[in-house]
Amino acid sequence: MALSAEFISQLNGIFGRDRLLIEPSDCWVYGYDNSKRQMLPEAVVFPLTHEETQALVRLCHHHGVHLTARGRGTGTTGATVPLQHGVVASFERMDRIVEFSKDNRYLVVEPGITNQAIQDFLKPHGFFWPPDPTSAAFCSVGGNLAYNSAGPRAVKYGTPRENTLGLRVVIGTGEAFRVGVYTTKGVVGYDLTRLIIGSEGTLALITEATLKLTPLPEAKATLRAVYQDVASAATAIAKIMAQPAVPCALEFIDGNAINMVRRYSTAELPEGAGALLMIEVDGFKEAMAVQIESIHQAAMNEGLLEFRKAESQQEVDALWQTRKALSPTLRKIAPKRINEDVVVPITELPSLIEGLDELSKRHGLTIVNFGHAGNGNIHVNLLYDPEADGESERAHRCLDDMFKLVLLLRGTLSGEHGVGIEKRDYVAREIDPAALQLMHGIKAAFDPKGILNWGKAFPLEDQI
């Protein structure tokens, strides 16, 4: 349904010509994210305030116009692609820090501020916000909250759900309210804050977030453990996570990933390595040696080839540059790859990696694995050439088998990338029918006309 002249006029009344796009050539770039999908919105607006956002939702609700919220477009699942065209609300200009309470350890921000801008503001004050996705320099905090995107530090400090105290939101009727608390404890009412975080813009638009802050550690050490094979590394991960020195990052890179990124990395990557673990520990300076030794003991097994501590900031930077280069490198050499972020219990990691190796051989595809091993969160990349005869079909059969394997191992289909469009039709495999019906009921309570980010995160009701 094309937007009416009356509707466009009312949008213009809220945002003015400088914050309203209606020309297709202008709107086109706001119709895609970091996935392979795109859909042209009929209008794009740039809210600056909570009140403008509320007026926008009320207008869309009244006219039955679909509305898709958007941050910086770094998501990989198509969650910000406007399937029903309609209006895209880009929050990139709502990027203010609203309030900082050092003694109460919280920061109130608008959704368009980048994750990196938050970290840069907090560092001189001795704090940080734990979520740290690889795209931190570009992604917005609104997007982090919409996906519950975490990054490496989640292994010790948790995800956005554990690091957000409250939200100011507008639901699908245009009604606005605040949920959550300003304190670190509170049990009054249902926990709508955690419900909205991770809901991918299907329940409400976030206009402010109260973030829980963590003091910066006094010291940090970066370690590297190299193994002859993936099985040895997977066994070590479980043992590392079972000892008292909880790492603040535990990253896994398999042999295929090591070989692929070698040319793009300044780190010395060993030849013939089957797997590599990057491990970080933090805390008091006096505790570093004890923590390192505890992790060293846990990391030792017959497959360990090398265990060492990075002795300079240059070595640390090179290791992290290696890890962060993986996704962009894969985009260069395999732009049509399938990238999934599955999670299994730590003890099932050896079975997952072994199963993925078997799937690689069965379907004749290269599979590259890396990710946040301390959470059991592995980014699985199926490499294929869509132009090659039959490869696309093999890749999607392999994907289907991979999801079956993950669920068989009591895992989940997404750890931090969200569901969006890409995984929507697989969700019913993981969630019981009764629970899905209840979730559709929750969606209807928040958004009775179904205008907010239609068709994302869950199968449509007639597919259940």
Image (spheres, rainbow, N blue to C red):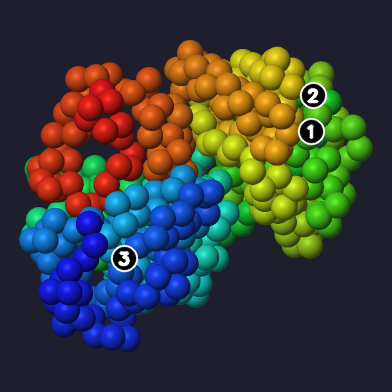
Q: Which callout, 2 or 1, points at the residue further toward the start of the chain?
A: 2
Image quadrant where residue 129 sits: bottom left
Where is residue 154? Give x, y as percent: 48, 44
Residue 135 seen in this snapshot: yes
SS under mark 2: loop
In the rendered structure, are the residues bearing label 3 and label 2 in contact, judged by CB atoms less than 8 Å apart? no
Residue 210 seen in this snapshot: no
Q: Which callout, 1 or 3, points at the residue further toward the start of the chain?
A: 3
**Amino acid marked by disc 1:** Gly
Q: Mark 1 points at which residue?
A: 255
On screen, residue 347 above or below 225: above
Q: Is residue 102 left or right of residue 323?
A: left
Instruction: Name the mark on residue 229.
Output: 2
Q: From mark 3 to mark 2, how far is it between C-alphas?
A: 52 Å
**Point 35% across, 54% down: residue:** 82
Q: Mark 3 points at which residue?
A: 42
**Point 85% across, 32% down: residue:** 273
SS under mark 3: loop
Q: From mark 1 to mark 3, how far is it between C-alphas?
A: 46 Å
**Point 46% across, 18% down: residue:** 407
In the rendered structure, are the residues bearing label 2 and label 1 in contact, judged by CB atoms less than 8 Å apart? yes
On screen, residue 95 above or below 140: below
Where is residue 150? Give x, y as percent: 46, 48
Q: Is residue 302 left or right of residue 454?
A: right
Where is residue 291? Give x, y as percent: 63, 40
SS under mark 1: helix
**Amino acid marked by disc 2:** Asp
**Amino acid marked by disc 3:** Glu
Image quadrant where residue 292 sits: top right
Mark 2 packing: few (<14 Cα in 10 Å), some, or many (20+)?
Answer: some
Classify the position of the N terminus by image quarter.
Answer: bottom left
